[in-house]
């Protein structure tokens, strides 16, 4: 059996009941248990907080669409060179955006991938916060506002980028491997 | 009244009841409401997950001591140039380590601050994960293990570093200002 | 019709006869004309030299295998964030290595992707030459030699990395877009 | 007795007479002998030149105020991660600026610390010269001039930054430790 | 006899006839065989492509002058710290530009060397492509166009920069040493 | 008349008497007044301290030879891209080392220029202090000691590097131009 995490993996059957139930819902929808849950389950309290944070920021179409949220994840995970997040969220982005090429184009070069002006502004702001957040200034926020982003949308861009600054590092810590299914999901042209 | 966050601040009285109760406990112990909570309360679900994640990783003396956990926060927040986290967790570090100089010495230069070999190994590993986690290799982990760190302690180093990679970026997003009290806490020599 | 290059594209029918013949062979094998040729054909003499250089280094199984040569291209193009080369040579790598995941794993994080020791040594040397070649020392070459690489293989690693240091910059200059076909080639598991 | 410098320290009594007299004046005012003098006294001719250079640039309120001069030192020493200069000149900055928080705020994040426009322009110019002086252009100087800085003030910003580019490296060379007194000076609110 | 390349050197007499003839023409004009040819001749097919690429881009006064082409080589080879290319093409630049100081001034600091606006725009664009081509945007091209560069001239700037991104890495791979003659060519004032 | 410094230049006749006398001695030996003095003379007290510091560190053959001291200046000024110091001290290095190529080889690539083990250790230590002194560790010093350097020699390497960290930034501040004479001094083979 292939490695999931360098610190081992927990089988879904061995999760605490609340987490088993919660992750089972995701697994049924996906058809498999994403490896990040089996790796993080080594620490149930941390997995619980991780899921809560994730759901608070990623499961919404208010302001930013779900596809835009995944766009931020793929762009910043590429800047951080996190294979798990690029591959897993790249799959979700392809599906949410109904575009089989978008994930590879954004992961290839998030700084220059062709995007509409709103998406370019979202990704530009996310990249500043991912790679040199100490230098974030009102000038960067003004760029986002000029593209029409509200304060709540700017918060979402920043908070999602921050959440995956954490996730990317957890994945690197675990040397986490993407499930085989993620590599091919959403690649059929629509 | 001084700025707390560029996106405004919520008064404790206006928090949802569960968060008000939870943050009140912290505020009573500290003597003031740390600004991070008033800034994040704009988003109760995110603040809830933040507190859960924080408590899961920072409120324990199993493996890493509480002082060692704060040491990681100060060192990596310095590498990320996050004033709020350096000042607030610097105060906690001074108290936990019973050392009025440690926070300024580690924040000044986390790469070379004089530390005992265990603490140096903890900080060295944390700095790799904070600043270039894609390059993390077994070689880095071997250095940590040679200093006596267990897998669980290595996980804690990595997970705390990851949590504050997020926190530092949230603080930069909010342009979060430290409460005046943090600057002077724990500075009297013991 | 979608953009090929920001400087326009030449139709195969309008290539000089020698180049039309040469690229036609490639196009027939692939089933389409890779966009790099249509973009570079703006300058026939440069395209001719490009093809010659490419063939001299990439069309050989002596020393380095063809799959190993593509591995170098994907790893260094990821370090350089070149979408065209990652996507196009990622497709070729999947086919040559008979591995549907290898390209995404190496492009995601070339520094830490799990590879056998020979491939890790090849990629490590290539990354030094791609990103900080002025600092290349005998120490780096010794690492490659310890993994069993001959002088001729080390030359190939360096020369292929150098060729794609050029190609990546040409692709960025042109804002070159990968053909749709490349995104899905070689993704079926074997 | 604690380490002053990795190359040892000279007692004030053992200084050459002219330096003993000169440093005694500083020591009487401060209440202690700053460690930098005891470390540099290993080389009297260098210490003499250091003091002369320091006095020529730091002991003046013409153009830049003394507090502004210390602001430059703290900001650039933070960019260079020099603990001695951050802690020692942070103390002086707190006193000169009559602000118990300014040093920790500027050292925490010199790029984004809230400052009035004149001080922001001073720090922005200083950071360019500290970290990437080869790229200094008329564009940077124009920013400083737009904030009202004269040529003489611009010279002072640059020359003070240059002097502490030297001092920071000397402190790193010596692994110089700040005197305990510096950590707490000027922290009482006014 | 001094080292030419760490992989040895081929004598001109031992070159394949076509390459011997071609390099002889250059050697007769220069008075010596430039070491790059003796180092690359280990791989005749690669040397052939290298010469073709070089001639296609460097032997022309259409659009960019020959001196401007050499200016790009010296500026980007300095950014890449390639001694062979700085010294050899610095010599050619001195001759082509009829200026004994230009090469040392541009190699010393390509970002700030005083140049007329057209040459400054050429060098600025070349430096972006040499050092961070993934971030190349229409904004950079607009700067070049504002200085009067045509699309063909912009292509030349980019393609020459790309060619020497390759050459610099080949020189580093070979640890290639400049011929003694290059150091002094073109230094007499005109 | 050509620019000396962007802040203007003082004629030797207008220097304060002590500085006029002191610089005249240098000028007579060189045959011209080095521009650095005419630029810095805008601030006599700073020029005086600069000359004192320079003489204390550069005018000695005790421990490090004069040529080794110049080697440090050229190597670190190249890392800092300071044209004035590379060109002026490159000339002095050629003369002191009686080697017409050494300056261009070291300035071209200080990290990999072929040097004997003692000189390589000197330059390696100097480059760490020039470019990332916060990370200087006992490990770096151990490398220098293994090459036979004494504590006094290590101090000289560090202090000369620190002095030119200052000088390079002053030259960038002034946009200081090298005198024409420096470009050609010491280029005749011995």
Image (cartoon, coloured by chain):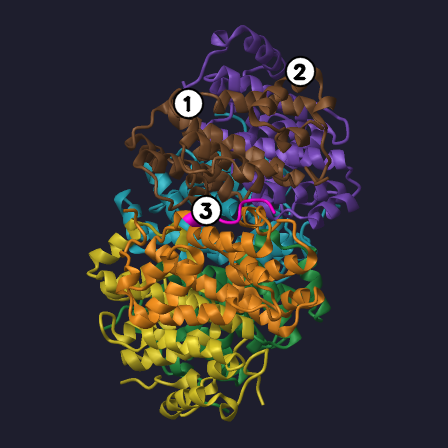
Chain colours: A yellow, B orange, C green, D brown, E cyan, F purple
Q: Specify few, some or many for label 2: CA neighbours under 10 Å numbering under 14, 14-19, or 20 or more.
A: few
Q: CA distance from mark 1 to mark 3?
A: 49 Å
At which x and y percent is residue F148? 80, 41
Which residue is found at the position 37% from the left and 57% from the top?
B33
Give the residues in magenta.
Answer: B181-190
At which x and y percent is residue D129? 45, 37
Q: Marks 2 and 3: in contact by CB < 8 Å?
A: no
- What residue would you read off at disc 1? F3
Q: Is residue F183 left or right of residue C17?
A: right
Main SS of the magenta segment?
A: loop
Q: CA distance from mark 1 to mark 2?
A: 40 Å
Q: Specify few, some or many for label 1: CA neighbours under 10 Å numbering under 14, 14-19, or 20 or more.
A: few
The chain holding disc 1 is: F
Which residue is found at the position 66% from the left and 54% from the top?
C137
Q: Nearer the viewer, residue D52 or D98?
A: D98
- Quadrant in which the C terminus of chain A is drawn: bottom left
Which residue is found at the position 64% from the left and 24% from the top?
D47
Q: Is residue C76 above or below residue F65?
A: below
Q: Is residue C76 left or right of residue D120?
A: right
User: What is the count of numbered marks?
Assistant: 3
At which x and y percent is residue E158? 39, 53
Kindly identify which numbered label has been placed on residue B183. 3
State which mark lies toward you, 3 or 2.
3
Q: Classify mark 2: helix, strand or loop.
A: helix
- What residue would you read off at disc 2? D18
């Amino acid at each position: 059996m292939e490695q999931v995490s360098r610190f081992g993996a927990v089988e879904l059957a061995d999760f605490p009941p609340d987490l088993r139930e919660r992750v089972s819902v995701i697994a049924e929808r996906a058809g498999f248990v994403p490896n990040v849950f089996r790796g993080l389950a080594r620490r149930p309290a941390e997995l619980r907080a991780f899921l809560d944070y994730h759901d608070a920021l990623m499961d919404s179409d208010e302001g930013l669409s779900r596809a835009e949220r995944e766009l931020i994840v793929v762009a910043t995970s590429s800047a951080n060179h996190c294979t798990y997040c690029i591959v897993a969220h790249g799959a979700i982005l392809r599906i949410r955006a109904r575009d089989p090429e978008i994930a590879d184009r954004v992961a290839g070069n998030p700084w220059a991938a062709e995007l509409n002006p709103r998406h370019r502004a979202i990704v530009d702001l996310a990249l500043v916060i991912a790679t040199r957040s100490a230098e974030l200034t009102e000038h960067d926020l003004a760029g986002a506002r000029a593209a029409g982003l509200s304060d709540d949308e700017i918060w979402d861009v920043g908070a999602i980028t921050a959440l995956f600054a954490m996730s990317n590092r957890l994945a690197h810590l675990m040397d986490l491997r993407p499930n085989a299914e993620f590599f091919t999901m959403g690649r059929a042209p629509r």
